[in-house]
Amino acid sequence: MRILICDYHVIVAEALASVLTGRGDDVIATTHDIDTAADVLRTADVDVCLLSLVFRGERHLHRIVDVRRAAPRTRLLLLVSRVDAAVLAAARDAGAAAIADQRQSMRRTIELIDRLGRGAASAGGVLVAAEPTGGSARTDVRRLATFLTVREREALGVLVIGGDTRTVARSLGIAPATARCHIQSLLTKMGAHTRLEAATTAVRAGIVSPDTGDWLLPTI
């Protein structure tokens, strides 16, 4: 399957691309803004385009149409921060294939990509797979994150901005072996199998800033 990823969170886009490529999909490109995604769609053959959008009023909804016009035959999956009447209507009018909550897990996102690749759609033309804002999955992740120690939070922040074990050790002023212990502990506490999964989950749940790696939740 030929896939285009457009997500303003660089770590999320690259993590998803890595997983999809690893299982044999052809990731045409990973982009971080709508204009670049539209440019790629005009020149490349894409089966599914994943487009992550943050809506701040209806002025952003017209961009769905821009992307759709660039590649009418590409199945468009929208990841949004909320699903309401305006968003659903815009998606339907633009001919989007599916809408999903941008805070869902990577596994669920990939499952939805697969469904679209097989031609799945709802009777109304738009497959809606989105949980309400403040859904239980996001709440559970944020609750688990509160159990991280200060060092584990700092290590997670480094992972989010693309650091490895040595970077974590250098940033925290600790030995690499100690850094590995902190990383393994935070993975266990967050229920993540890999560092990419932990970093992606932290960004999608609003736990860590994707730009700076700063902790976003209130601390005691």
Image (cartoon, rainbow, N blue to C red):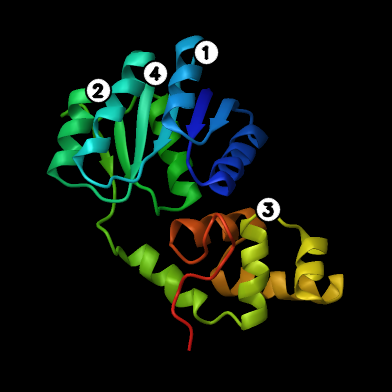
- Mark 3 and mark 1: Cα distance apart in space: 28 Å
Q: Amino acid at mark 4?
A: Thr
Q: Earlier in the sequence, mark 4 or mark 1?
A: 1
x, y percentage for residue 64?
A: 30, 28
Instruction: Work out whether residue 53 or residue 100 is closer to the camera in this orientation and state it.
Output: 53
Q: What's the residue at 82%, 68% (across, down)?
A: 170
The residue to which callout 1 is attached is: 44
- Specify whether 41 is left or right of 176: left
Name the secondary structure under disc 1: loop
**Image quadrant of residue 117?**
top left
The residue to which callout 3 is attached is: 162
The residue to which callout 2 is attached is: 95
Local crowd at mark 4 within 10 Å, few (<14), some, or many (≥20)?
many
- Mark 3 and mark 2: Cα distance apart in space: 35 Å
x, y percentage for residue 198?
A: 58, 61
Local crowd at mark 3 within 10 Å, few (<14), some, or many (≥20)?
some
- Mark 3 and mark 4: Cα distance apart in space: 30 Å
Local crowd at mark 1 within 10 Å, few (<14), some, or many (≥20)?
few
x, y percentage for residue 130?
A: 29, 48
Local crowd at mark 2 within 10 Å, few (<14), some, or many (≥20)?
many
Q: Nearer the viewer, mark 3 or mark 2?
A: 3
x, y percentage for residue 213?
A: 59, 62
Q: What's the residue at 56%, 32% (across, down)?
A: 30
Q: Earlier in the sequence, mark 4 or mark 2?
A: 4
- Mark 4 and mark 1: Cα distance apart in space: 10 Å
> Does the image show residue 194?
no
- Disc number for residue 74: 4
Q: Earlier in the sequence, mark 3 or mark 1?
A: 1
Q: Earlier in the sequence, mark 3 or mark 2?
A: 2
